[in-house]
Amino acid sequence: MIGGRLRDLRAEQGLSLRALAERTGLSATLLSQIERGKAEPSLKSLRLLASVLGQSVGELFDSSESLTVRVSRPGERSRITSPRGYIQYERLAPSNGQLEVLRGVLAPGEVSSDEPWSHPSIECVVVLTGTLTVHVAETAHEVTAGESVTFDSRHAHRYQNVTDGVVEFLVSVAPPSP
């Protein structure tokens, strides 16, 4: 889904793969693989592509088709990798530029990013299994299975698993961050 959209946007702007590679710092080979659905772009790559193509990250996933109902099935969902590859999110809902819904899994000791980061959105995190430590500004919040936390993501934040078990959680972001 993302590959076709990127190819269309690149073509609309009259860019070759090589020209897009030069502007983003990504290799033409990687861009070709993403466009053909052979590789999943990292969140960092998506941000670079969105910036160069004059889009938000959410718009990269936006199709021109009107969405009435869409069933999301395991194994058919796209994935987004965090900038440093610490966590891979599974996209549960098609992006429409208004809401992003992701499923994340952190193994014991893992974090979503090296450092907390911020963006202009609201996030709601629902923990499905385990206990997730959600760092917002200078405060750590322990959120256990069945609980949720909502915060203004303009405050620097990140997710961490300080337990011995796997943590699975859902993240809703509105609007999707660039």
Image (cartoon, rainbow, N blue to C red):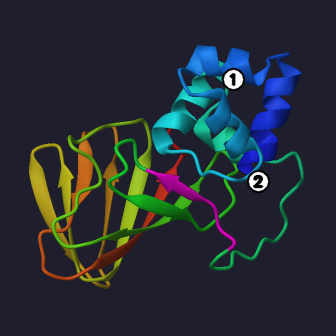
> Residue placed at 24% from the left, 82% from the top?
130
Residue 54 shows up from this direction:
no
Residue 155 image-quadrant placement: top left
Query: Does 79 lie within the magenta span?
Result: yes
Segment colored magenta: 76-81
Q: What element carries label 1?
A: helix
Q: Position of residue 13 (x, y in %)?
A: 82, 17
Q: Name the residue under label 2.
A: 1
Q: In this view, does 174 lie to the left or right of 138?
A: right
> Residue placed at 19% from the left, 73% from the top?
108
Residue farthest to the front, as pictured = 29
Q: Where is residue 126 in the image (x, y as percent from the top left)?
A: 37, 73
- Asked if 53 appears above or below 115 in the picture, the reply is above
Q: Mark 1 points at which residue?
A: 53
Q: In this view, does 48 lie to the left or right of 126?
A: right
- Asked if 22 appears above or below 133 in the picture, the reply is above
